[in-house]
Amino acid sequence: MSTKHLTWHTPQVTKLQRARLKAQKPAILWFTGLSGSGKSTIANAVEAELVTRGHHTYLLDGDNIRLGLNRGLGFSDRDRVENIRRIGEVGKLFVDAGMIVLSAFISPFQADREQVRGVVEQGEFIEVFVDTPLAICEARDPKGLYRKARSGEIPNFTGISSPYEAPTTPEIWLRGEQMSLEELVASVLSYLEERGYLVGEV
Amino acid sequence: MSTKHLTWHTPQVTKLQRARLKAQKPAILWFTGLSGSGKSTIANAVEAELVTRGHHTYLLDGDNIRLGLNRGLGFSDRDRVENIRRIGEVGKLFVDAGMIVLSAFISPFQADREQVRGVVEQGEFIEVFVDTPLAICEARDPKGLYRKARSGEIPNFTGISSPYEAPTTPEIWLRGEQMSLEELVASVLSYLEERGYLVGEV
């Protein structure tokens, strides 16, 4: 009896099989932009539209990452790098699972974003720059963070006391203050459609 | 124009919606057992069967975790705890995404496994104990690790120089040496079917 275990065949499910089952081409939609730029709002709305169309998605954001996987990481340079690195690695796992995964983090440093781009395959990393001017983000200030940053209560705040390195060649460039939410969502969906992410054949 | 952004409505996609789209009840199938017990082989075969039936799955194992998300973690007690903690948190994200996620790690400590059970909801953590006697695992020794552990080349090796705390009340108890792979897979699938993980209504 015991020898039969030596001949066990292990069927491996592949990324292609998982993606075919979902009728989509998996990718990471990486939303980057200042605090208050609208990243999370737009990403949520894009996800909702994708799900309405029957696509398989997941959204990584502060709510499900900061208190879970990345609990214990702070805001030092080293921790910020590790924060983005882990999000990228989780994104890669979701892509491997065949999903369209959306992430919404400020991710201010070009090098960190390029590191994430490097862990997935060509065409699987879609950088979405939510380009809303600082003045507008600061005027919105939905969580009162800019006020605290200006008063010095929050140190190293992106856009105020820490740099935001804007993407120079993002796959999708959204002018957050010039379009309605519906228009912004439509432009992301158009990108995905035109490049074949949403068709059944992968 | 700028005020319209203040009334942006954010549609939130819920776990229930994601799961409904997949016609399944999401969960983590947490395979635990000694090195060489057959965890990974059985988990791969269960995943293949689930995918054949149209289910949406993902498998977390050493291949996609150790060199990615958990790169940099070693085998100290502290690092082992963190290793399992992160796998549990990623499992939770996949459950939230509506997936049936399988994990195959020795995970020798009861407390670590209970910690993972605690981060998901009731019924979402399914402990699968691959109960293959040490003597059989050591005789198989597919990677030559037991030989190295016996010679002292590998310290703190589970079952040899580090304890394996067997689950006392696992949801699924597999006698790895008494059944064929097909029978083992069938018993996992039966568990999932009987408890409603594989039906369309969630």
Image (cartoon, coloured by chain):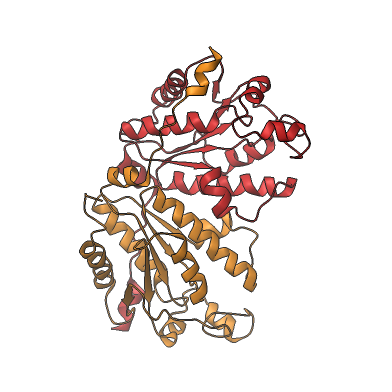
Chain colours: A orange, B red
* Image point (66%, 49%), residue name: B82
Instruction: Judge by depth and name the residue closer to the eye, A158 or B188.
Output: B188
Question: Who's the residue at 61% across and 25% down the image?
Answer: B140
Question: In percent of the image, x 32 and y 63: which residue is there?
Answer: A45
- In the image, residue B122 above or below residue B15: above
Where is residue A154 drawn, in percent x and y?
62, 78
Q: Position of residue B172 (x, y in %)?
A: 53, 24
Towards the viewer: B50 or B9: B50
Seen in the image, is A149 located left or right of residue A17? Answer: right
Position of A142 with respect to A2 (left or right) is left
Residue positioned most to the top: A1
From the viewer's perspective, tell me whether residue B128 is left or right of residue A184. Answer: right
Q: Can residue B158 be spotted in the picture? A: no
Report whether B181 appears left or right of B112: left
Can residue A50 be seen in the rendering of this structure? yes
Q: Could you say where residue B76 lies in the image, as x and y percent from the top left?
A: 74, 47
How many numbered discs sit on the rendered protein? 0
Res B47 → quadrant:
top left
Query: Which sits in the foreground, B66 or B110?
Result: B66
Work out whether B107 lies above or below A174.
Answer: above
x then y, percent, for residue A5? 52, 21
